[in-house]
């Protein structure tokens, strides 16, 4: 039986896409971590369906920023912090690394807190769940290869379907969802604006650009296959926000309707039981566990990549501990210290997380500017620099991000 030439081409393209698949989808889905799930849950519980429309422009901005990072990784074969050190100097790189280490460490603490909170719903003490979770994510990376680790991460992405099922079990008002998307509205109140800024901040994080570019480099994706890498990035950006929609929908249909206020993703999972059934509640809690474990692996890994690239040290999951001691040493340090902090009963976790969000808010537009300068340098990118229309979109993104992030910082300190 002869296969038509067009079908052969499509089949070959599909297999190349499967080979390239990973960095974009993994990076975006990790962004639905404990903090992200809490933010989407609170948005749905406190504001109903009214802010769902905001995820459409947020998705577009995420695609724009991540596409540039992935393209730089494919074309240069270097990570983002490596390029920043080469073109902006060691001093700027050093301060950038300090800020990222602190921010990612605070977020890692939040992930282990998410592991503890999710399993407490099932009756498991944090003194059991957190050490086991820390050991699992440590052994996964230290003893694995890039291919094996990526496969585990891709499987973890599939478990986000629990939030889609939770959203369906909550029996939402789909007409209200459609109205939010087709006729968007925004109340000019501090609460509504603060929530909008929080949604942007939790969906587009500075660490994502560093991890994505490093993962693309380690996967050794060739320039001729970049279109498949771009599809991977776009797919991931849509997936992360589709899950976010269903988290908001689940909470809007139940908690907002019942007038229940929440502060964490654990509160949302517990409150769903009497309103949408125990299965919906358990699925929500399991999703939180999966997301927290997933992010507890990636955030320290991202930090290790950033620091080792910036310092010119050996890095990569494909290397042995003896070949990249700084890389694995930093990864191990962040994992076990982050887990240890969560087990320390009197440590003020909320202030630590607040400060990390302030640093995130400051760093994001700065890092986007770094990316914009680098990606438009023909000495670095050759023929793969941005076009005029793409640059316009990026500058517009920066122009929007800077005032919004200033507002986020001011709102965290209660100034607005």
Image: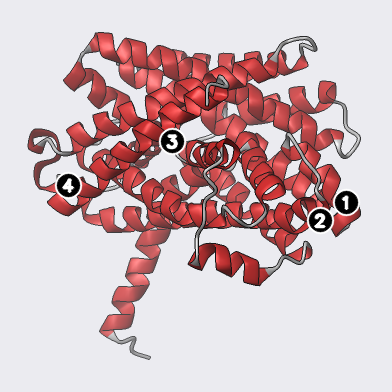
* Foreground pick, 43 / 86: 43
Question: Where residue 192 sits in the image (x, y, percent)?
Answer: 57, 42
144 on left or right of 110:
left
Q: Secondary structure at mark 4?
A: loop
Disc 1 target residue? 273
Disc 3 target residue? 208
Q: Secondary structure at mark 1?
A: helix
Q: Secondary structure at mark 2?
A: helix
Q: Earlier in the sequence, mark 1 or mark 3?
A: 3
Disc 2 target residue? 280
Q: Quadrant of residue 110?
A: top right
Mark 1 or mark 4: which is in front? Answer: 1
Q: Quadrant of residue 379?
A: top left
Q: Secondary structure at mark 3?
A: helix
Question: Where residue 366 sits in the image (x, y, percent)?
Answer: 31, 26
Marks 1 and 2 sit apart, C-alpha to C-alpha, by 7 Å
The answer to whether one can see residue 146 in this image is yes
Tell me, for residue 320, which label it has, or none. Answer: none
Residue at coordinates 35% horizontally, 32% vertically from top-left? Answer: 402
Residue at coordinates 28% horizontally, 82% vertically from top-left? Answer: 6
The answer to whether one can see residue 322 in this image is no
* Foreground pick, 7 / 268: 268
Q: Earlier in the sequence, mark 1 or mark 4?
A: 1
- Asked if disc 1 and disc 2 are in contact, CB closer than 8 Å, the reply is yes
Q: Residues within 10 Å of mark 3 (few under 14, many from 20)?
A: many
Q: Earlier in the sequence, mark 1 or mark 2?
A: 1
Residue at coordinates 42% horizontally, 53% vertically from top-left? Answer: 57
């Amino acid at each position: 039986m002869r296969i038509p030439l067009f079908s052969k081409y499509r089949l070959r393209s599909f297999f190349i896409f499967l080979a390239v698949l990973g960095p974009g989808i993994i990076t975006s889905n990790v962004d639905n971590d404990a903090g992200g799930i809490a933010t989407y849950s609170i948005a749905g519980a406190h504001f109903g369906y009214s802010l769902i429309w905001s995820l459409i422009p947020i998705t577009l901005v995420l695609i724009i920023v991540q596409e540039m990072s992935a393209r730089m990784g494919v074309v240069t074969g270097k990570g983002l912090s490596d390029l920043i050190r080469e073109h902006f100097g060691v001093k700027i790189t050093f301060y950038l690394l300090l800020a990222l280490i602190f921010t990612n460490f605070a977020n890692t603490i939040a992930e282990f807190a998410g592991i503890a909170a999710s399993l407490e719903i099932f009756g498991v003490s944090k003194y059991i769940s957190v050490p086991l979770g820390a050991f699992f994510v440590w052994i996964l990376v230290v003893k694995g290869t890039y291919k094996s680790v990526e496969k585990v991460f891709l499987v973890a992405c599939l478990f986000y379907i629990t939030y889609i099922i939770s959203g369906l079990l909550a029996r939402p008002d789909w007409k209200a969802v459609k109205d939010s998307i087709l006729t968007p509205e925004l109340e000019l109140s501090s609460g509504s604006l603060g929530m909008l800024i929080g949604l942007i901040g939790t969906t587009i994080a500075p660490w994502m650009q560093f991890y994505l570019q490093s993962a693309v480099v380690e996967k050794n994706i060739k320039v001729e296959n970049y279109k498949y890498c771009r599809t991977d990035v776009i797919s991931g950006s849509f997936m992360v926000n589709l899950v976010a929609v269903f988290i908001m929908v689940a909470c809007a249909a139940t908690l907002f309707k019942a007038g229940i206020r929440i502060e964490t993703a654990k509160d949302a999972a517990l409150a769903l039981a009497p309103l949408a059934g125990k299965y919906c509640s358990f699925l929500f809690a399991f999703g939180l566990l999966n997301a927290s474990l997933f992010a507890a692996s990636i955030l320290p890994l991202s930090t290790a990549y950033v620091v080792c690239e910036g310092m010119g040290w050996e890095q990569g999951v494909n290397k042995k501990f003896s070949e990249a001691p700084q890389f694995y040493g930093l990864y191990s340090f962040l994992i076990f210290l982050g887990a240890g902090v969560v087990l320390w009963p009197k440590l003020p976790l909320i202030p630590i997380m607040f400060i990390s969000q302030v640093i995130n808010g400051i760093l994001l537009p700065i890092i986007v500017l770094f990316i914009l300068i680098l990606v438009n340098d023909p000495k670095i990118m050759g023929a793969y620099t941005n076009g005029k229309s793409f640059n316009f979109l990026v500058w517009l993104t920066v122009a929007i991000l800077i005032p919004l992030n200033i507002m986020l910082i001011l709102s965290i300190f209660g100034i607005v």
